[in-house]
Amino acid sequence: VTITLTADAGEGYVVDAKPTVKDASNNDVLVDGSNGTYTFEMPASNVTVVGSFKKATYTVNVTQPSITGCGLSVNPSSYEQGKTVEVTVSVAAGHELEKLTYTEAGKDPVTITKASGKYTFTMPAADVTVAASFKKLDYAIAYGTLPTGASITAKVASTTATTAQVGDTVTLEVTPVNGYEVETLTYTEEGKTTPVTISGTSFTMPAAKVTI
């Protein structure tokens, strides 16, 4: 009589090897098959069947952001179910992390939160994809002391602005006092002491508050 065995590893496990079958005299019985389905010919005695299983490993795929200087990394790239996965996040100057998630195929994204200074999640019994979104920060545009009657207005994309984001082109509309002309325009980044000379009437916003 041919006996068929079906090996069900259960969630988080896989079949490690063919099951072993021994007869009443502890002799091995030949087992054929693969991929969880096996057969053997029943001897003229009772038999003992022992399965072989091991924990499955699942892959963490990473979708890299398109913003230069922002990135994600996971090392190693595969984990057993229940293991803690740490995600390293790199953030470019002038940006901040908006959202970090992992997603199993066919399911909604799960938010990864930060605890004790690290972004971690518990590996499910499935491959996952880690992804993130980033956004630009707003930095204030301030003005130093101007002569009475003089004014400076900052604009971004032709709109009057009190803040700008890194990489924005800030254009200054300067109204000098009657009888005067603009000699120099400078901006100074917060935390720095050396002014940066503005060529013409526009400059590229750095990743810091500026004073004109």
Image: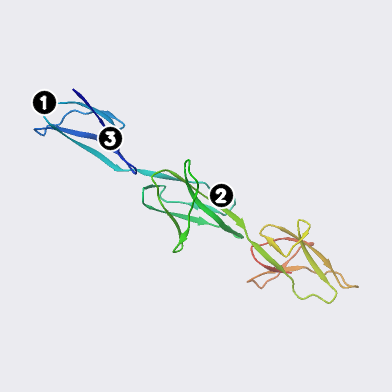
State yes or no: discs 1 and 3 in contact (Cβ < 8 Å): no
Circle 1 packing at 10 Å, graded few (<14), some (14-19), many (20+), is few
Circle 2 packing at 10 Å, graded few (<14), some (14-19), many (20+), is some
**Frontmost residue, 5 versus 78:** 5
Q: Amino acid at mark 2?
A: Pro
In space, the residues marked 2 and 3 are separated at their CA atoms by 42 Å
- Give above or below for 132 relative to 205: above
Give the mark, 2 or 3, whose residue is nearer the N terminus: 3
Q: Amino acid at mark 1?
A: Ala
Residue that extends furthest to the right in the rendered view of this protein: 179
Residue at 48% across, 40% down: 106
Identify the residue position indicated by label 2 in the image: 65
- Give above or below for 146 relative to 16: below
* Mark number, residue 7: 3
Of discs 2 and 1, which sits in the foreground?
A: 1
**x, y percentage for residue 4?**
24, 27
**x, y percentage for residue 152?**
80, 68
Q: Amino acid at mark 3?
A: Ala
Q: How many marks?
A: 3
Provide the secondary structure element on which disc 1 rests: loop
Give the mark, 1 or 3, whose residue is nearer the N terminus: 3
**Frontmost residue, 101 versus 203:** 101
